Image: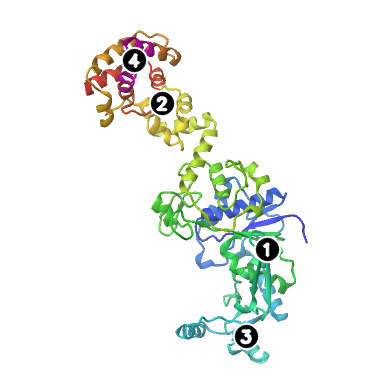
């Protein structure tokens, strides 16, 4: 057995990848990197009815955007391929046959109608129908029929499935890296279908065979697979194979109320549940993505890491490079992780603060280009000045539009507050003060205006509020002297004149 750590992320291409799936991929990636192992992407596309075109590429693009690319998978064969289950079809039948030969599985000829009848009959009696040790000999299968009869049915082309023969009266002992020891009474397990009548394996068989052939050492997956763990362990035992270690991650829960986080929660509360935008090929519906909403991939990775895991310290900000050594399966919680959209924004804000101003300026400049705004302003200075107030790069327009466009209207509440009796005269006087300033750096503008206000022996607010309102159109924005300095002499005077005309 290969001792190198090998983990896999095995999504189905049935639509966009939910952030719960991205988190599973992330935890697999972190575990692999921490132990110098391989992170494998396998596409579980045996269910062709639910296959959605474009979904596989979306999964690959999403992992790449997050910065957690796979080492091995579709298009990166390392000798364990192919990595799409639909291209591995020829492999599974021999394993199903091996189980039949060893008495660990059997042919079942029960029709869908017959099984449906049993199900309804049980329901009517207040019971649940379960196909296993207690009734398998009364049903139509190779355990209850003679070998000749079975062969006849197969030769006649009758449809059948292959079922696992789960053991009777055994305590199945399971180990989970997160949940510890689990015991299951085998009498409660049903004889799951391993091979369908259409010649395709079910998830359970394909999954075990692939993990074994790909030499996967650790299966790290969502909690929804926990009920399948006993069957998977029994399948490994039935083949005489060494099982990988298992770890089942807690679910991501909705922000309010009970239950799993869904797209509906995101739509209702205004946040994405997918890493990237997804356009449904059938309906044309577009689902929002973190990428298009302006989130930085580093922020997404950081907030996902903290859904169900924490390092046990006060540190909350981790780059991917820092997450690798810190990550530990034993620190993953058993309980569900509540999704918190505000915390997500907090992470985004933190990562925007760390982002180089030149990168922000370049992106902000292209927003200005799209709006058709030509400007003489130093964009990098504006970014530096407003950065602390921004969460997304798109916020810079709202925070700084007054640098590029004079206000066309003035906030009504602010005007009542700022423009009082005598404000007109004060503003006229301020215009003369500004006209007299030659060095227009904020280091010079600030003391010049402040000294003038002090000499008037009036409260600072009497000048600062109407001045800000004249320049910005509201009482928002950074330091008012910085604004004067950046707008320059002519533009500042024009705006004050305008405000006097409109508000006085």
Q: Secondary structure at mark 1?
A: helix
Q: Is residue 478 magenta?
A: no
How much space separates mark 3 and mark 1, taking CA atoms?
30 Å
Reply above or below: 294 against 267: above
- In the image, the segment drawn in magenta is 449-465
Residue position for label 4: 490
The image shows residue 342 at horizontal and vertical percentages of 46, 45
Instruction: Name the residue rendered at 64%, 71% in the picture.
Output: 230
The image shows residue 373 at horizontal and vertical percentages of 38, 28
Relative placement, left or right, of 232 versus 397 is right
Q: Quadrant of residue 202?
A: bottom right
Residue position for label 1: 211
Residue position for label 2: 478
The image shows residue 413 at horizontal and vertical percentages of 26, 31
Q: Of label 4 and label 1, which has the lower sequence position?
A: 1
Q: Judge depth for marks 3 and 4 and give the one in front.
A: 4
Which quadrant of the figure contains the C terminus?
top left
Specify few, some or many for label 4: CA neighbours under 10 Å numbering under 14, 14-19, or 20 or more: few
Q: Of label 2 and label 3, which has the lower sequence position?
A: 3
Q: Of label 2 and label 4, which has the lower sequence position?
A: 2
Q: Which secondary structure class fits the magenta region best?
A: helix
Residue position for label 3: 154
Q: Judge depth for marks 3 and 1 and give the one in front.
A: 1
How much space separates mark 1 and mark 2, taking CA atoms?
58 Å
Q: Of label 3 and label 4, which has the lower sequence position?
A: 3
Q: Of label 3 and label 1, which has the lower sequence position?
A: 3
Relative placement, left or right, of 236 versus 289 is right
Q: Judge depth for marks 1 and 2 and give the one in front.
A: 2
Q: Of label 1 and label 2, which has the lower sequence position?
A: 1
Reply above or below: 439 against 419: above
Q: Quadrant of residue 247?
A: bottom right
Reply above or below: 178 against 466: below
């Amino acid at each position: 057995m290969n001792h190198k750590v090998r983990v896999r992320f095995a999504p189905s291409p049935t639509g966009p990848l939910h952030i719960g799936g991205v988190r599973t991929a992330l935890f697999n990636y972190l575990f692999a990197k921490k132990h110098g192992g391989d992170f494998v992407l396998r596409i579980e596309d045996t269910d062709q009815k639910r296959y959605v075109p474009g979904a596989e590429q979306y999964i690959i693009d999403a992992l790449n955007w997050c910065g957690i690319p796979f080492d091995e998978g579709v298009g990166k064969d390392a000798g364990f391929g192919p990595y799409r289950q639909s291209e591995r079809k020829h492999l599974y039948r021999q394993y199903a046959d091996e189980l039949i030969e060893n008495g660990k599985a059997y042919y079942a000829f029960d029709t869908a109608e017959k099984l449906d009848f049993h199900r309804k009959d049980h329901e009517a009696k207040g019971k649940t129908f379960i196909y296993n040790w207690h009734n398998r000999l009364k049903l139509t299968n190779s355990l209850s029929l003679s070998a000749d009869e079975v062969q006849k049915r197969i030769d006649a082309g009758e449809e059948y499935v292959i079922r696992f023969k789960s053991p009777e009266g055994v305590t199945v002992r399971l180990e989970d890296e997160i949940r510890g020891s689990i015991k299951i009474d085998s009498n409660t397990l049903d004889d799951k279908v391993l091979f369908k009548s259409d010649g395709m394996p079910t998830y359970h068989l394909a999954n075990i065979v692939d993990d074994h052939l790909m030499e996967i050492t650790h299966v790290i997956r969502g909690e929804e697979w926990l009920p399948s763990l006993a069957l998977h362990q029994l399948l490994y035992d039935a083949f005489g194979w060494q099982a990988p270690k298992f770890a089942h991650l807690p679910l991501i829960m909705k922000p309010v109320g009970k239950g799993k986080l869904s797209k509906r929660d995101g739509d209702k509360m205004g946040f994405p549940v997918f890493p990237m935008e997804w356009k449904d090929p059938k309906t044309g519906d577009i689902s929002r993505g973190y990428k298009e909403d302006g989130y930085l991939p580093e922020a997404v990775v950081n907030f996902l890491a903290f859904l169900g895991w924490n390092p046990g310290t006060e540190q909350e900000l981790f780059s991917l490079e820092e997450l690798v050594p810190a990550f530990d399966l034993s620190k993953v919680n058993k309980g569900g992780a509540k999704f918190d959209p505000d915390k997500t924004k907090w992470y985004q804000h933190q990562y925007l603060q760390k982002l180089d101003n030149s990168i922000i300026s370049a992106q902000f400049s292209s927003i200005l280009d799209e709006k058709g705004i030509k400007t003489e302003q130093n964009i990098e200075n504006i970014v530096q000045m407003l950065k602390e107030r921004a969460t997304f790069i798109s916020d810079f327009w709202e925070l700084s539009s007054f640098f590029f466009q004079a206000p066309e209207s003035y906030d009504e509440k602010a005007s009542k507050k700022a423009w009082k009796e005598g404000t007109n005269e004060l503003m006229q006087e301020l215009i003369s003060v500004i006209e007299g300033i030659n060095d227009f750096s904020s280091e010079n503008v600030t003391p010049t205006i402040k000294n003038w206000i002090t000499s008037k022996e009036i409260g600072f607010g009497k000048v600062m509020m109407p001045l800000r309102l004249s320049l910005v159109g509201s009482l928002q924005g950074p330091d008012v002297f910085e604004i004067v300095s950046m707008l320059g002499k002519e533009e500042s005077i024009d705006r004050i004149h305008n405000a006097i005309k409109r508000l006085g």
